[in-house]
Image (cartoon, helix red, strand yellow):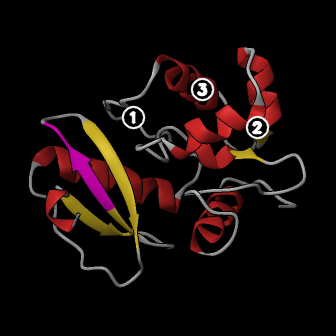
Amino acid sequence: MLETHSARMQAPFAVLGVRTAGECLTGIDYLPLGAPTLAPLDAFSREVCRQLDTYFEDASFTLDLPYRGQGSVYQQRVWEAIKRIPRGIALTYAQVAAQIGSAPRPVGTACGANRIPLLIPCHRVVGSGGIGGFMHSRSGRGIEIKRWLLRHEGVRGL
């Protein structure tokens, strides 16, 4: 997996593996803390890393990068709804489902298929009884990353 990244940068909670195709972001992988970093291989990857660093310093910063999210028509609908969730707000899977005329479980599945976290902020979608899942898990490292991101953006109580 490591050789496919155009950059690997240290974040407060993980090493982020940045994937690009030309001047288009195609993925961000959450790698374990301590994974080797990789200096950006080109100007676009440098810009991705610069914007991510700025977001980690200031949660009010809006990431503005061209990206390509590959998914089904349904997944695209879910991701568009999630992109409209304001920073500092968390909606439940059921609330997102109601917005698009769906059920909560497929919304969760679409969140899990998101390859461009942070730009498509699936961390802002939570369970009706608490934080819910993240990175296909309900505990451990993925949930700690989700908690960090929500706290960073000002969401409290999860």
32 sits to left or right of 128: left
Residue wearing tag 1: 64
Nearer to us in this view, 34 or 46 = 34
Q: Could you say which quadrant of the image residue 90 lies in? A: top right
Q: Could you say which quadrant of the image residue 41 lies in? A: bottom left
- Mark 2: which secondary structure? helix
Q: Is residue 53 above or below residue 89?
A: below
- Mark 3: which secondary structure? helix
149 sits to left or right of 6: right
The amino acid type of the residue labelled 1 equals Asp
CA distance separating discs 3 and 1: 20 Å
CA distance separating discs 2 and 1: 25 Å
Residue wearing tag 2: 93
Nearer to us in this view, 44 or 131 = 131
Residue 20 is inside the magenta segment:
yes
69 sits to left or right of 62: left
Residue wearing tag 3: 78
Q: Name the residue rendered at 87%, 61% in the picture.
A: 157
Q: Position of residue 26 (x, y in %)?
A: 29, 40
Q: Position of residue 51 (x, y in %)?
A: 36, 49
Mark in front: 2 vs 1: 2
Residue 98 is inside the magenta segment:
no
- Mark 1: which secondary structure? loop
CB atoms of marks 3 and 2 within 8 Å = no
The amino acid type of the residue labelled 2 equals Tyr
How dense is the environment of label 2, judged by Cα within 10 Å: few (below 14), some, or many (20 and up)? many
Between disc 2 and disc 1, whose residue precedes?
Answer: 1
The amino acid type of the residue labelled 3 equals Val
Q: Is residue 112 above or below residue 9?
A: above
3 sits to left or right of 36: left
Q: Which residues are magenta?
A: 17-21
